[in-house]
Image: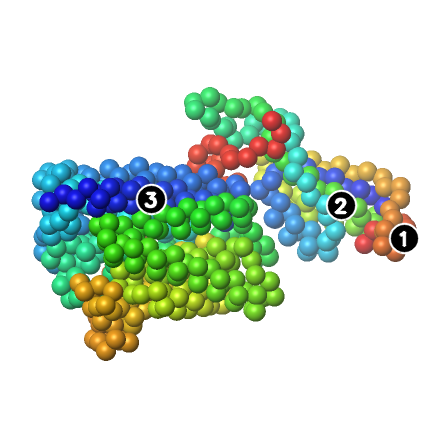
Amino acid sequence: MINSGDTAWVLISSALVMLMTPGLAFFYGGMVRRKNILGVLMQCFIILCVLSLQWVLFGYSLSFHPGNGFWGGFGWLGLKGVGLEPYADYAGTIPHQAFMIFQAMFAIITPALIIGAFAERMKFSAFLVFTLLWATFVYDPVCHWVWGMGGWLRNLGALDFAGGTVVHINAGIAALVTAIVIGRRKNLEHNAPAPHNLPFIVLGTALLWFGWFGFNAGSALAANGLAVNAFVVTNTAAAAAGLSWALIEWIHNGKPTMFGAASGAVAGLVAITPAAGFVSVVPAIAIGILVSVFCFIAVSLIKPKLGYDDSLDAFGVHCVGGIWGALATGLFASKAVNAAGNDGLFFGNPKQFLIQLSAVTVTLIYSFIVTFVIYKLVDFIFGMRVSEKEELIGLDLTQHRERAYTILE
Amino acid sequence: MKLIIAIIQPYKLEEVKEELYKQEVNLITVSEVLGHGRQKGVTEVYRGAKETGNLLRKVRLEIAVNDNFVEPTIKAIIKGAKTGETGDGKIFVLDLKECVRIRTEERGSLAIG
């Protein structure tokens, strides 16, 4: 039975999540040098175009058709059989296509997250091929494992409310792989490039925070109490993490920064994502405060020491924050919040923590290996990295023949 | 004392700075300028409309040096900025009459470094 309130909420949530990809574009775009901002905006925007098509043509079928444990198969190619009646195994009160388009927005933003790792140096043509392959061979299978009917991690009992493993760990570890394989940007040693537009970063953060209400509360797939719980803990965790990051900087570096507070808020949103439908407010505060500690260590201490150039910290925020969120779900989950979930370690069920740990590990290993293979393949055929001269001139002019800003009219 | 003004390709700034530091020339002023030489820039296209032959972005360096630093400075700029293609830029060397360090009111050679 279609419920009009539920359908309205899921459609609005889909639109909210759609806005996150352009929001992410500004979040990342503000961080790069001004010669590369259009490159970043374009990469995010074209993902919105390409993966919207991939999803309705075959991505949704690979991910959500009830196939075997590992992939969904071709049963719903071109949305054949995905109609306007509910599909009760996923959501019984909204049209099947509403569920499909909501999930489309997740499939779009996930590969966009990886952009942060190889920003300012990837060839646009190779990027397109890499992204399409990654969505098809990494995102779609992992999505099926965790959320699809018959998916083996779903059957194992792993809890991932809105995409901690599927979205953030998955994209975050892919980010680390690409950052390492593509290599460091030129001239980083004496002159670490400063973000060219901090207000864009804040604008992007605001759009992400706003859109994340659709991401998490929309994942209830109904306009109900669970959606409200997800909404409240999402806002709470983001707030706690934004404040926490700023305080860490204040203690560690002497001044709190706008960039830090924004980074913290995003880390908090990442961490609460898998937990949003399973934890209550006080654990959400703990999740938020601690995620900034872990991500700050990853970004400010570990990254410089190891020397990989994850330019915009896609790994440091999304993978590290995502792992913490997935594990924290195994600690703080409570059946009092969501009877369909499970209790975590702190509620007397240590087994859930181990299940979460195995889901995290499996996702890390699978995404790491397949991302590496796809990268090497595309690199072999097309060449992933722009020439040194193109990198110095910037992606805007060399990849797109346009520039973002003028000096004189 | 000389004032060296160099117009170079923007993307060569980092390399030129590196070369200047190697010669212990640390005091430079950098600005972004527009100019017109023989070179055509990277063609920009906006909704199909090509923009060529416009003013091109360049970087302008100003470096005041004592006489014994003139040649090393020129060589460093060439080393960092030269590609051999049209558009590499130019170096101008001007006589510098006076130089005053505001903080100490020192003048001349003393004030320059």
Seen from the viewer's position, the closer of residues B37 and A270 is A270
Seen from the viewer's position, the closer of residues B46 and A24 is A24
Label 2, residues with CA under 10 Å away: few <14, some 14-19, many ≥20: many
Do circles 2 and 3 both sit on a common chain? Answer: no
Provide the chain ID for the residue under circle 3: A
Numbered badge on residue B63: 2
Residue occupying the point 26% across, 60% down: A277
Can the viewer see residue A127 in this picture? no
> Dividing the image into 4 quarters, which one contains the C terminus of chain A?
top right
Q: Amino acid at mark 2?
A: Ile
Is residue A207 shown left or right of residue A371?
right
Residue occupying the point 34% across, 60% down: A233
Give the number of the mark in front: 1 or 3.
Answer: 3
Residue occupying the point 20% across, 39% down: A56
The local secondary structure at tag 2 comes to strand
The answer to whether the residue labelled 1 contacts the one labelled 3, judged by CB atoms less than 8 Å apart, is no
Do circles 1 and 3 both sit on a common chain? Answer: no
Q: Give the image location of residue A194, x and y in percent.
A: 56, 51
Numbered badge on residue B105: 1
Quadrant of the rendered image containing residue A320: bottom left
Q: Which residue is under mark 3?
A: A16
The local secondary structure at tag 1 comes to loop
Q: Give the image location of residue A209, x and y in percent.
A: 40, 51
